[in-house]
Amino acid sequence: MRDIDDYESIFPHGSYTEALRSDIQESQSTLGGRTFFERLLDLLNVKWRKSYPPQGDSGLRDLHQRICEAPIALHYKHCLIFYLLRDLSPHYKTTPEWATQFATDIHLETRFWTFIEGIWELDHLQFNNAVGHLTHPSIIPTFPDEILLTLLNRRHHKMSGMDETDILPLAYYNCVKPPLATDLVRTPFIKYLAARNVTEAYTWLRARPSHEHRALLEALIEQTLDTRTWAGGDLRDTEHLYPREEKAVELVGLPLSPQEEEWLEKFLTEGKGRTLRGAEDTVLMRRIATGGLGGLRGRRSCRGRRMGGWIG
């Protein structure tokens, strides 16, 4: 068993170069300000502030000491050091590979090894490899909502090449079943599902807790009628795969409950959705589809409620 307190034996080949630090800082920015390694340090109560990525040998020594002195189980310290070695290994070619040799020497459990590999790949924007590791059945899901949100937010980055056909968020969700505890992750996920298949997105939201239904339905409607692609790219690139008109027809034909019907009308006539292209037509077509035209006289206009001479 390796003595992890012995800095020289753990890191005999070198420290973080400025090029490596720059790469990590760029990834931090892409990931919203911090890596999943930093989240893991926080979770384990390691006092690491401003020490990652470490600057030179002195910075690595300091971070190593903070990890070794942290009041956590030894296997967690092994995981954190393994991650640091995983950072360094591609930049200092050794045989056998530096990080792998360390994990082998300390007999790092498969579930911990797999998880660290996964978050390292995620932190270095290797998303396909990351999902492959992070959906492994041996690991206990950690940061599941944050990981799903990271996969969804790739659409904001020009180099991601992400569009409505991207399978990674759905693959991760189906394997891990993250709780989706906040609107911060629920809203982009339902929009992602709606961009792929409106009917399946509606089926999914009906299985969610009832207090989430209205916000999810409104997000589904907004995504369906939005003239932009979900990933923010050129509509012409994916329109042939799932035309906007086809999505609108599916929306009109959804088997909404009476309460959901009311939510749809209010959203498209009085709420945020009233400015969406096709909002008025959608309300009218829903009324036709559900036989609601008979009671249209005396009801509010599809254009919204009139208030003091203004259309609401």
Image (tube, rainbow, N blue to C red):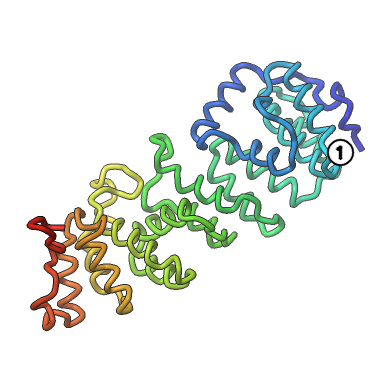
Residue drawn at x 55%, y 39% as measured from the top left: 126
For label 1, the crowd category at 10 Å Cα-Cα, with few meaning under 14, some 14 to 19 and many 20 or more, is: few
- Please state the horizontal and vertical placement of residue 246, each as a whole percent of the image: 23, 64
Q: Is residue 52 above or below residue 270?
A: above
- Which quadrant, please, contains the C terminus? bottom left
Residue at horizontal 59%, vertical 59%?
A: 176
- Return the residue nearer the eye: 106 or 74: 74
Residue under the image location 50 percent in, 31 percent down: 29
Which residue of the protein is positioned furthest toward the front in this rendering? 308
Picture quarter with the N terminus: top right
Residue ID for mark 1:
105
- Which quadrant would residue 232 be assigned to in this image? top left
Q: Nearer the viewer, residue 102 or 24?
A: 24
Quadrant in the picture for residue 106: top right
Which image quarter: residue 234?
Answer: top left
Question: Element at badge 1?
Answer: helix
Judge from the rendering whether residue 272 lies leftward or rightward of residue 298; answer left or right: right
Q: Amino acid at mark 1?
A: Asp
Counting from the top left corner in percent of width and height, residue 132 is at 60, 50
Is 123 displayed left or right of 79 in the figure? Answer: left
The residue that appears at 16% across and 71% down in the rendered structure is 285
Q: In the image, residue 256 lies at what x, y percent?
A: 31, 76
